[in-house]
C-alpha cells in the first residue's frame, strides 16, 4: 500500500463533493481475492481532541471511499455512525475483496433544507 497524499484534495464522489484526508493505492490495483482481507485505515489525532490533526476535520465525519471510475464510492458510513470506526484509536476497519484506490474522505456539507 502506498499513501498518495495527505491534506485536502477535492474529490468527486457518488455522494457529492468531498475532501481527502489521505488517499491510498493498494497494489496491484484491480487484484481481487477471497476471502476478503481486513484492512485498517488510520488518521492522526495526537491530542485526542476528536479532530484529525492535518486537516482539522471532525473524526465523526470521516469515511472510506473506493475509486470506481469516474467517482469515489463510499464503502463505509461516517465514523460517527459506523460500528467499525474507533475514534479513540483513530481507525476504521474494513473488509476488502480487492485492491484499488481508496481514500479517507470528509464529504462537504451540502445545503440545509427545512420543510415546514
Image: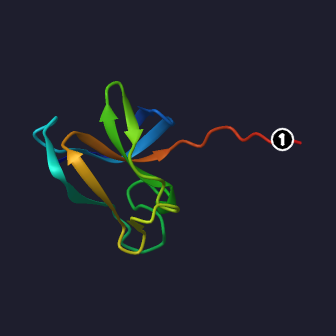
Q: Is residue 76 visible?
A: yes
115 sits to left or right of 78: right
At horizontal 37% and vertical 35% (from top left) the residue drawn is: 72
Measured as percent of width and height from the top left, residue 13 is found at 44, 34
At horizontal 54% and vertical 42% (from top left) the residue drawn is: 108
Q: Residue furthest right?
A: 116
90 sits to left or right of 106: left
Q: Would you identify the image quadrant in which residue 84 lies?
A: bottom left
**Disc 1, SS:** loop
At horizontal 15% and vertical 36% (from top left) the residue drawn is: 29
Measured as percent of width and height from the top left, residue 100 is found at 21, 39
At horizontal 32% and vertical 31% (from top left) the residue drawn is: 68
The one nearer the camera, 99 or 104, is 99
55 sits to left or right of 116: left
Q: Which quarter shows the C terminus?
A: top right
Q: In this view, does 102 lie above or below 12?
A: below
Colouring convention used in this rendered image of the protein: rainbow
Measured as percent of width and height from the top left, residue 36 is found at 20, 53
Q: Which residue lies furthest to the left in this view?
A: 28
- In this figure, which residue is indicated by the disc labeled 1? 115
Q: Is residue 84 above or below residue 70?
A: below
Q: Which residue lies furthest to the front in this view?
A: 34
Measured as percent of width and height from the top left, residue 70 is found at 35, 24
Q: Is residue 1 visible?
A: no
How many numbered circles are shown?
1
Q: Would you identify the image quadrant in which residue 47 lies?
A: bottom left
Give the class, few, some or many, for how many residues have Cα within 10 Å of label 1's Cα (few <14, many ≥20).
few
The one nearer the camera, 44 or 73, is 73
The one nearer the camera, 74 or 62, is 74
Amino acid at each position: 500500500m502506498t499513501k498518495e497524499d495527505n491534506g485536502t484534495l477535492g474529490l468527486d464522489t457518488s455522494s457529492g463533493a468531498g475532501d481527502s484526508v489521505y488517499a491510498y493505492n493498494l497494489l496491484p490495483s484491480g487484484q481481487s481475492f477471497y476471502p476478503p482481507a481486513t484492512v485498517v485505515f488510520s488518521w492522526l489525532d495526537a491530542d485526542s481532541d476528536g479532530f484529525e490533526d492535518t486537516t482539522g476535520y471532525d473524526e465523526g465525519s470521516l469515511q472510506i471511499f473506493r475509486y470506481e471510475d469516474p467517482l469515489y464510492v463510499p464503502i463505509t458510513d461516517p465514523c460517527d455512525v459506523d460500528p467499525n470506526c474507533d475514534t479513540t484509536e483513530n481507525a476504521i476497519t474494513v473488509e476488502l475483496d480487492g485492491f484499488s484506490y481508496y481514500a479517507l474522505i470528509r464529504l462537504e456539507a451540502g445545503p440545509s433544507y427545512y420543510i415546514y
